[in-house]
Amino acid sequence: MKERFICKSPGKKSLAVVLRDKKVISPSMTREYDFVWRKARGCYVWDLEWHKYLDFGAAVAVAATGHANPDVAKAVRKQLQDGIHAAFPDFYNELPVRFVEKLLKFVPSHLEKAFLSNSGTESVEAALKLARWHTKKSTLIAFTPSFHGRTMGSLSLTSAKPVHKERFGPFLDVKHAPYPYCYRCPFGGKCDGDAQVCSSDYLSELERVIKSCKGNAAAIFFEPIAGEPGYLVPPKEFVVGMRKLANENGLLLCADEVQSGCFRTGKFLAMENFGVNADIVSLSKAIGGGIPFGVTLSSSKIMSWPSGAHANTFGGNLLASASGIATLEYMKKHKLGENASRIGKIIQKRLLELKEEHEIIGDVRGIGLMQALEIVENKKTKAFAPEMRSKILCKAVEKGLILLPAGKSAIRICPPLTLTRQQAEHGLEIIEESIRVVSRK
Ligand SMILES: Cc1ncc(COP(=O)(O)O)c(C=O)c1O
């Protein structure tokens, strides 16, 4: 069988694993490179051939405290001896309670209760069910593009790539409004420089969608920074206006902070960058320090559903709770939010300089350590350049840097929040070299 390797062929040991994987693992996975992990520590990952890579992906925004964080690993090891799973939905246990009490100290005070689960999609499903339960309404509003997960409820909200949804319908009743994508403004380029005008166009569209629900809409689901299309950052005016529209129309606002939460943007919740509170917040990825964990937060008034309305088997799992507590403590002790802001600014400044130098960098955007570059054929046409994007990713990995693709032709930068200035500069050098090589061709 002839294998098509996206990057240069992997080493012999890695190749053997790739071939075994292809035989037994569902081909629905989305592997960009034939890269086989051996181990990971801090901001570095090693492949099976012991090549060392700087990681600007953090296992897709999970390893916020760094891979195999020693404090987190110690807490998990200790918990392994005291019990792994205690059927928290059926029996009381102090550890998950302690985790939630700690987490509540990091978030705005109107968030008072948590539902615990195991993944991002489950934390969105819980938000979706809670919104319907509380409002007694069924239609949901989400955005295009957006990514909220792949189980049927969250997938109904998701609107990113056709492959996510093809053949899986019928879906829940979800109406989609355009997510602010200022680089590709659908309103005749008004976004350029005038956030007020741009926001009012997007808000009019959102209002039109709300009205089309004829009073049956329960909630708006919103990513404070849209991950899948390459970290779109909405104007503050839009987020403030959306909150106002939700209030005026009796809708709940549900923030999907699965990727943007836990200090990735400098603030614990990305919504704080806009000064806006959501009624329901979904967290996952970083919160478990690498152990699967999902958390859905809301007020006591909203989260007042009766026993049995929503539960699961593994929510509040003891390893996840121990890991979550250690993760939050580490984040606070080491001021990871401040580091994300500081290093994020250094990265964005350099990326903006690179944008001036290179015709193929159309846009640079992001907050904190959630940064993206949009690769285009040239600045005038802004045509998507997916092949060029893949070449840049491959060049970077050859030079020892792991980057993530996003959307049609963007590159995501979401390293561990422990990234140092020196590591950031090293990664930026590799990005610069990779772009230089690819744009020369
Ligand atoms: C914003 C957002 N929501 C939900 C999800 C789904 O999370 P999971 O893959 O853990 O189900 C993701 C995953 O990438 C995400 O980025």
Image (cartoon, rainbow, N blue to C red):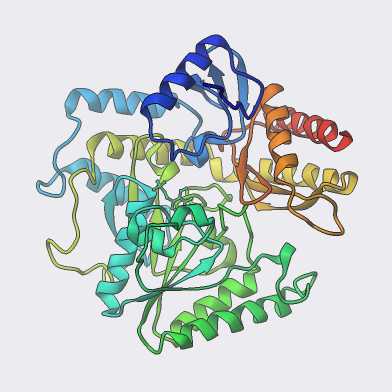
Figure disc tally: 0
> Residue at 50% across / 35% down in the picture?
59
State left or right for residue 163 relative to residue 306. Answer: right
Task: Give the residue furthest to the front.
Answer: 1
Q: Nearer the viewer, residue 318 or 120?
A: 120
Placement of 416 over or under 372, stated as above or below:
above
- Locate residue 375, reporting x and y percent: 75, 47
Task: Give the residue furthest to the left.
Answer: 91
State left or right for residue 433 relative to residue 164. Answer: right
State left or right for residue 404 relative to residue 137. Answer: right
> Residue at 53% across / 25% down in the picture?
42
- Locate residue 217, reporting x and y percent: 38, 80
- Locate residue 204, reporting x and y percent: 60, 84
- Quarter of the figure with the C terminus: top right
Placement of 94 over or under 234, stated as above or below:
above
Placement of 8 over or under 308, stated as above or below:
above
- Locate residue 260, reporting x and y percent: 52, 52
Q: Is residue 39 visible?
A: no
